[in-house]
Image (spheres, rainbow, N blue to C red):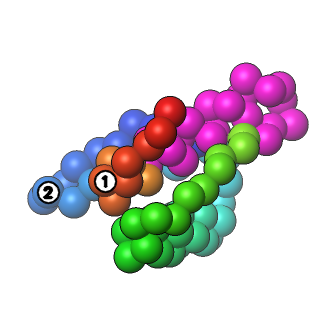
Amino acid sequence: MITNNLTQNGVILKRNLSGRSDREMTVYYNLLNIIGDRMVKVPTSKITLVGSSEKDPQDGLKMAESVKKYLTSVFWIFCLN
């Protein structure tokens, strides 16, 4: 989950609260950045976010909302809902 951002010299640093390794989180952010960049370059593109979690459906929904928040705040992508 992407939460609790820190700022250092104007750069947003992400806190790893997910329990995943730093390497996994780097890959995760790289994928999100590729998706966001491509969505900006192709404004008509659409994406459907579906969260999944071994815990429960609510945790999966939180994960999907976290990705939505990241894409909208970093790339200024407009959301329909």
Residue 37: mark in rendering: none
* Extent of the magenta region: 52-70
Residue 27 in the image: state x and y as whole percent.
60, 71
Dot 1 falls on a residue whose secondary structure is loop
Q: Amino acid at mark 1?
A: Trp
Rendered residue at 68%/31% (across/down): 61
Residue 76: mark in rendering: 1
Residue 37 in view in this figure: no
User: Seen in the image, is 55 located left or right of residue 41?
Assistant: right
Residue 65 in the image: state x and y as whole percent.
56, 36
User: Seen in the image, is 2 located left or right of residue 10?
Assistant: right
Q: Are marks 1 and 2 in contact (CB under 8 Å)?
A: no
Residue on which disc 2 sits: 10
Q: Does the magenta portion include 56?
A: yes
Outermost residue, front direction? 44
Q: Amino acid at mark 2?
A: Gly
Residue 11 in the image: state x and y as whole percent.
21, 60
Mark 1 packing: few (<14 Cα in 10 Å), some, or many (20+)? few
